[in-house]
Image (spheres, rainbow, N blue to C red):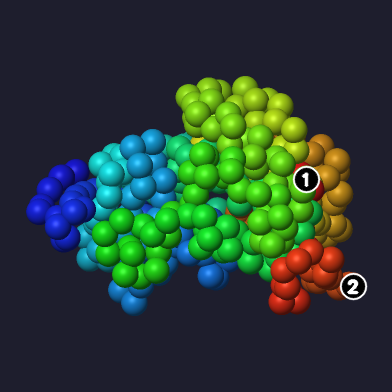
Amino acid sequence: MSWASVVGVSSTEGERRRTWRPDWPCSVTGALRPLRRGAGDPTFRLDDAGRVWRGTRTPEGPATLRVGADASDGEVHATAWGPGAEWVLESLPGLLGAHDDWSGFEPRHPVLVEARRRHPHVRRGRTGLVMEALVPAIIEQKVTGQEAFAGFRMLVHRFGEPAPGPGRDLGLRVQPDAGTLRTIASWEWLRMHVDHARSRTIVTAARVADSLERLAGLDPEEADRRLRSLPGVGEWTSAEVRQRAFGDPDAVSFGDYHVAKDVGWALTGSPFDDEEMRAYLEPWRPHRGRVPLLIGMAGLHRPRRGPRMAPRTHLPARVTRGGGPGRLS
């Protein structure tokens, strides 16, 4: 791997670059797509050259990260701006899945064997950033995707900040910091489609944000226990955070409206409920999360029938109808 530093592209913010060659064919967009919160996510952009732009808040401060891969030699080229530039570049391999070890995973089922054969290089990355994953996960609890993504967009636009460097010109933004989250009034949350229960959970998490960020150094079971000790954070929310922040291969989104049904349909022909999926996935521990990941990569979703969850209409802000059903906490 190689590093290069150059003079900043503006008079106030520097630019840093890193070139890294992974030892597998790395799909940058595939690795980073799970971090995107809907098509209008203001912290995520995909440019015409196929490069991913992210606005992120690191322990060193905000950063803009631009990442793309060279198809000719497999090299990954990353450029970053802002106080957190060095931090995001140092974290680049983990972000793209370099630490995701599949060696202990046995597909066992013909559907999974074929999915793994078709997607041999899929990796789950890790950001190392808990609050970045936790806040949108809480917003997504028990509501439609449309409502959750709209609420997250409004939160970032109203209370976040422009991403450093050229990210600002793209309209890229960074999530609000913990101090800001603690001061948002309850009526402002309601305007962003976030009810009192979820806003209270976010504010509670923001009060202990420093402790939460240190969970990355713990074993997955302890990190799960501590996340779920927060009032309002349940099994689904913890799994969503651990998947993105830690790249936890055992994290399964129990409580999701679709996951258990899709896993059951793909592997047995009949949708599961959560407890059926929990029992069925037990032989794959500590790689249970790879099963729904491969099923999703293979595009195996049960036929959608029946009514869909509708966005709520009693909150102050208006939400366009649409989006998938929500999740439990």
- Residue 61: horizontal and vertical position, in percent? 35, 42
- Residue 273: horizontal and vertical position, in percent? 86, 49
Seen in the picture, residue 1 relative to 114 is either above or below; the reply is above
Which residue corresponds to mark 1? 197
Q: Residues within 10 Å of mark 1 (few under 14, many from 20)?
A: few
Seen in the picture, residue 5 relative to 261 is either above or below; the reply is above
Nearer the observer: mark 1 or 2; the answer is 1
Q: Nearer the viewer, residue 108 or 172?
A: 172
Identify the residue at horizontal 79%, vertical 39% (top origin).
278
Seen in the picture, residue 7 relative to 301 is either above or below; the reply is above
* Residues at marks 1 and 2 touching, judged by CB atoms closer than 8 Å: no
Note whether residue 276 is visible. yes
In this rendering, position of residue 26 left or right of residue 118: left
Identify the residue at horizontal 59%, vertical 43% (top origin).
183
Q: Nearer the viewer, residue 5 or 122?
A: 5
Identify the residue at horizontal 72%, vertical 41% (top origin).
200
Q: Nearer the viewer, residue 253 or 181?
A: 181
Which residue corresponds to mark 2? 306
Residue extending farthest to the right is: 306
Identify the residue at horizontal 33%, vertical 50% (top origin).
63
| Location of residue 257 (image quadrant) | bottom right
Mark nearer the N terminus (1 vs 2): 1
**Amino acid type at image mark 1:** Ala
In this rendering, position of residue 276 left or right of residue 38: right
- Residue 240: horizontal and vertical position, in percent? 63, 45
Quarter containing the N terminus = top left
Q: Secondary structure at mark 2?
A: loop
Note whether residue 140 is visible. no
**Amino acid type at image mark 2:** Gly
Q: CA distance from mark 1 to mark 2?
A: 28 Å
Q: Secondary structure at mark 1?
A: helix
